Image: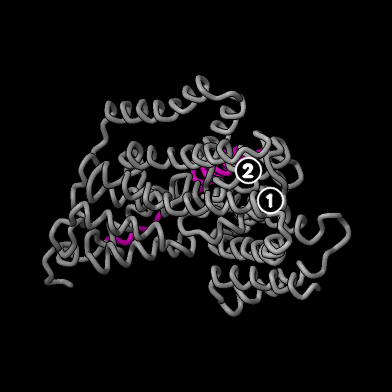
């Protein structure tokens, strides 16, 4: 590696083919998606050096929204500017959005058929087990001190029992992280060169640590133009709905709700789902708890970011509000996808130069730690919320079969390390067999 020359500049067509393929194979959540990008961009093609890749990943970890999709957008932007970022970000999402749209159509059309309903009998408990696994992973990484455990417990109590809105919890966690930095002694031990590749190694990549990425210098005027253009893209659909839609209040509510959800998606999809469920199920009445679980199960079977499950919520919102119109439901799904991912593009194109100034900042590190700790408590609330709908829909009566499948799923996923997609398929087949045997 040390004596290798950098590869030729990748063509836009070559990169476009990878982003399209990534959209179809990006199973396994953000960790798996990031691993696929790292293997191709860093190891195979040497388009981006490891240090530059991790630098970009750190940017995306600071932002709300799906970090893997944002990393794809940022990588595409580094390689081919704005058109590269748009291509990478859109193609990362488009296959899963189309697939979930098809699954949603099938769900509302054939979902009441007993054989189809039986598929979800074991899928729902399997999804609860997947959420429990998410708690274990996030908790292991984020709960490092008693203070972090305290933040997680407080967040759980506030959202589960006191029904405090998720955005307020995020604000509280940010303030707590800032307080710890500024009110307690904090020193960051420096280790120069500990994570720096040698200059020769860096030179073996097309984009390396020292490459000046186009448009990376901060410009207040350009930032203003980008924010203005982003606002125009945000308000344009609302203007169209106000002119052409019969029920503008619904479209305004849908657009504002998913815009707000996009801005508080710290910690991944599991973190924002309790907030989405709390509002869309209990306040707006767009879908039921069990339908929310079904949507999460469908979302787990598609490639791309898990946050795409919000598209199912949008579909059901349109379907319910229009008394079963598949056209309105489909437009609502597209609107949800648009407003869910639009902020991510704005964050990358307009915010990266600003975020670059905070690199390795102890303030940012503390804020992230406390935010992630709060997210752990929020996901625990989601687990109980969904678990109660599966094993005790009529509390305190417990349904033994779903409870047993949750335990079996936990063993399969956590102990035997069975692939999540494979286990979802096994759960669907098990539900069909249960229906066929008449048990």
Task: Please indicate whether residue 118 sits to the left or right of residue 85 in the image.
Answer: right
Task: Please indicate whether residue 44 sits to the left or right of residue 418 in the image.
Answer: left
Does residue 47 appear anywhere in the picture?
Answer: yes
Q: Main secondary structure of the magenta part?
A: helix
Residue, far top: 243
Magenta stretch holds residue 34? no
Residue 273 in the image: x percent, y percent? 61, 48
192 versus 168 height, above or below: below
Question: Which mark identifies residue 41?
Answer: none
Quadrant position of residue 34: bottom left
Circles 1, 2 touching at the beta carbon (< 8 Å): yes
Q: Residues within 10 Å of mark 2 (few under 14, many from 20)?
A: many
| Nearest the eye: 148 or 261 | 261
Q: Secondary structure at mark 2?
A: helix
Who's the residue at 16% across and 65% down the image? 204
The colour scheme used to paint the residues is one colour
243 versus 400 height, above or below: above
Question: Which mark identifies residue 291?
Answer: 1
Q: Which residues are magenta?
A: 165-192
Residue, far right: 396
Residue, far bottom: 416
Magenta stretch holds residue 189? yes
Question: Which mark identifies residue 316?
Answer: 2
Task: Please indicate whether residue 80 sits to the left or right of residue 418 in the image.
Answer: left
| Nearest the eye: 428 or 191 | 428
Q: Secondary structure at mark 1?
A: helix
Residue 63 in the image: x percent, y percent? 44, 45
Quick one: quadrant of the C terminus? bottom right
Who's the residue at 33% across and 30% down the image? 226
Residue 409 in the image: x percent, y percent? 66, 72
| Nearest the eye: 109 or 42 | 109
Q: Mark 1 and mark 2: span between their CA atoms?
A: 9 Å
């Amino acid at each position: 590696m040390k004596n290798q020359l950098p590869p030729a500049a990748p063509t836009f067509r070559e990169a476009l083919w990878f982003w399209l393929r990534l959209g179809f194979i990006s199973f396994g959540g953000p960790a798996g998606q990031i691993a696929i990008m790292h293997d191709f961009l860093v190891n195979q093609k040497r388009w981006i050096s490891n240090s530059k890749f991790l630098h970009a990943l750190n940017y995306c970890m600071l932002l709300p929204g799906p970090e893997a999709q944002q990393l794809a957008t940022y990588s595409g932007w580094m390689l081919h500017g704005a058109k590269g970022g748009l291509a990478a970000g859109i193609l990362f999402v488009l296959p899963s959005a189309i697939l979930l749209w098809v699954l949603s159509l099938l769900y509302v059309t054939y979902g009441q058929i007993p054989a189809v309903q039986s598929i979800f009998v074991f899928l729902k408990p399997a999804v609860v087990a997947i959420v429990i696994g998410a708690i274990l992973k996030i908790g292991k990484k984020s709960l490092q001190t008693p203070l972090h455990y305290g933040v997680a417990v407080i967040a759980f109590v506030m959202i589960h029992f006191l029904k405090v809105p998720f955005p307020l919890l995020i604000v509280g966690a940010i303030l707590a992280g800032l307080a710890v930095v500024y009110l307690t002694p904090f020193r960051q031990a420096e280790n120069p060169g500990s994570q720096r590749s040698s200059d020769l190694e860096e030179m073996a990549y097309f984009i390396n640590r020292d490459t000046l990425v186009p448009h990376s210098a901060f410009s207040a005027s350009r930032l203003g133009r980008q924010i203005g253009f982003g606002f125009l893209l945000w308000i344009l659909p609302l203007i169209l709905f106000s002119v052409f839609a019969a029920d503008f209040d619904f479209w305004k509510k849908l657009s504002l709700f998913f815009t707000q959800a996009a801005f508080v998606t710290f910690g991944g999809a599991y973190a924002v789902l309790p907030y989405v469920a709390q509002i869309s199920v209990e306040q707006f009445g767009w879908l039921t708890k069990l339908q929310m679980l079904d949507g999460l199960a469908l979302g787990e079977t598609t490639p791309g970011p898990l946050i795409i499950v919000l598209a199912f919520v949008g579909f059901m919102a349109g379907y319910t509000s229009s008394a079963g119109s598949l056209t309105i439901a489909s437009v609502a799904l597209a609107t949800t996808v648009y407003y869910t991912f639009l902020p991510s593009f704005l964050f990358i194109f307009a915010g990266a130069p600003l975020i670059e100034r905070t690199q390795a900042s102890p303030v940012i590190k503390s804020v992230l730690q406390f935010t992630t700790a709060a997210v752990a408590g929020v996901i625990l609330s989601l687990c109980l919320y969904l678990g109660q709908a599966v094993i005790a829909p009529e509390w305190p009566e417990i349904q033994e079969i779903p409870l047993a499948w949750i335990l079996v799923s936990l063993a399969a996923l956590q102990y035997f390390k069975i692939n999540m997609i494979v286990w979802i398929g096994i759960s669907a087949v098990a539900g069909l067999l249960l229906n066929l045997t008449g048990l």
